Image (spheres, rainbow, N blue to C red):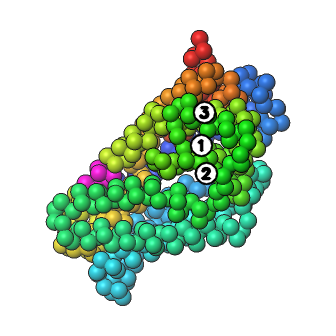
Amino acid sequence: MAPFLVICLLLIGAKWAAQMGLDHLNQRHVRAHAGEVPPAFKDAITPETYAKSVDYTLAKSRFHRVEITWEAVVLIALLFSGVLPWFYGAFTRASGSSIWAGAAFLFLTGILLTLLELPLAWCAQFRLEERFGFNTTRQGTWWSDRLKGLLLGLVLGYPLLLLILKLVQAAGPAWWLWAWACFVSFQLVMLLLAPVLILPLFNKFTPLPAGSLREQLLSLGERAGFRAQDIQVMDGSKRSRHSNAFFTGFGRFRKIVLFDTLIQQLTALELESVLAHEIGHYKKKHIPKVLAWSMGGWLLAFYILSVLARTPWFYGSFGFATGNLFASGNIVPVFLLFTLLAGIVTFWISPLAHQFSRRHEYEADAYAAFLMKEVRSLCGALRKLNEKNLSNLTPHPLYSGFYYSHPTLLEREEALDRLQR
């Protein structure tokens, strides 16, 4: 086996071993604290609910072990069995090597990979989530969601692939810059259009009825200088009893969205504090910052793609024929291999990304405390959300560093308490 293939195999194994080790650490840590409710939350959660949250955490961890093992087995089989170059060769012999065929190959391969993940996704929804009372999705809705996602990929993703492959042919060595600009432009357009054209395909959005809650939330937005066109309620209960809140759109098209489950779970003042937190993300310019980091990451990704496309031993190591850099047929395997291998590298930098996200959450919490002029309502909302979602109150610090984009409940409460001193 070529040295590069050995390195890839070791990286896949290292990621799997690290994930299994993190799950083991977290399970031990959770079990060590399972005997009684953590002292900080004894007045906020019953022993029965805490015991159920422990069971839910352990069940998710066991299921996650199955997922990551299946993911590693599939990846190793795809990369080292020779099935990918065989499939690509068979496909190009039947369809040719035009950019249309290249985009179709990538799209079809993505569909096949998704099919390999479907059984576990189904079990997560209709076994794990069902067991703990979260699932409210009907079988028809679940399958309809997947079909809609496939059709959206065909309508939106396939033309984007075509354009990028065309740029490889037409733009010369600087193709990766043009492809990056095209991809980023597509993302920005989707940010504008998704709330209007895509989200309504999956969920129903209705205006929050006139009344004290609507006036209270709009008044909060006015105080913060955050003007929204509307406050809408999303039928999140159609799929799950988990809850959330967010805002979509830009400028005068901005809308505040509340899950119907969130309205059922929180008081008016707690809802106001959650909205204040979301406004905090806007006021602190977190969305532009995240977009800037994302654009930088994609710029690096496209540059690496351009380097790998000029490195015949990279795709040749996996059995693909080498050829002209500017032929779309040559770049297609590079796109595929890069997509499959990226996760074994990005996993190790996920703690840095999560640290960045956590800092934003602390800043949004602090802004909510400033806007509300107290922390009690936000703490109450966070406690209820953690209770209703059966969140893990005692994750291992190393595990949360790799997997949690938000601080734990205890960390957020301690930060809010410091603001009061």
Residue 350 vs residue 345, the one in the foreground:
350
Residue ID for mark 3? 220
User: At numbered mark 2, what does the secondary structure look like: helix, strand or loop?
Assistant: helix
Which of the two discs, 1 and 3, labels the residue nearer the N terminus? 1
Mark 2 and mark 1 residues within 8 Å of each other at the beta carbon? yes
Image quadrant in which the C terminus is located: top right
Q: Residues within 10 Å of mark 2 (few under 14, many from 20)?
A: some
Kind of residue sitting beneath label 1? Asp
* Kind of residue sitting beneath label 3: Leu
In this image, 150 relative to 301: left or right? right
Q: Is residue 285 left or right of residue 166?
A: right
- Residue position marked by numbered label 1 in the rendering: 23
Q: Which residue lies under the disc numbered 2?
A: 64
Name the kind of residue labelled 2 in the image.
Answer: His
What whole-number distance in Å separates the C-alpha atoms at marks 1 and 3? 41 Å
Q: Secondary structure at mark 3?
A: helix
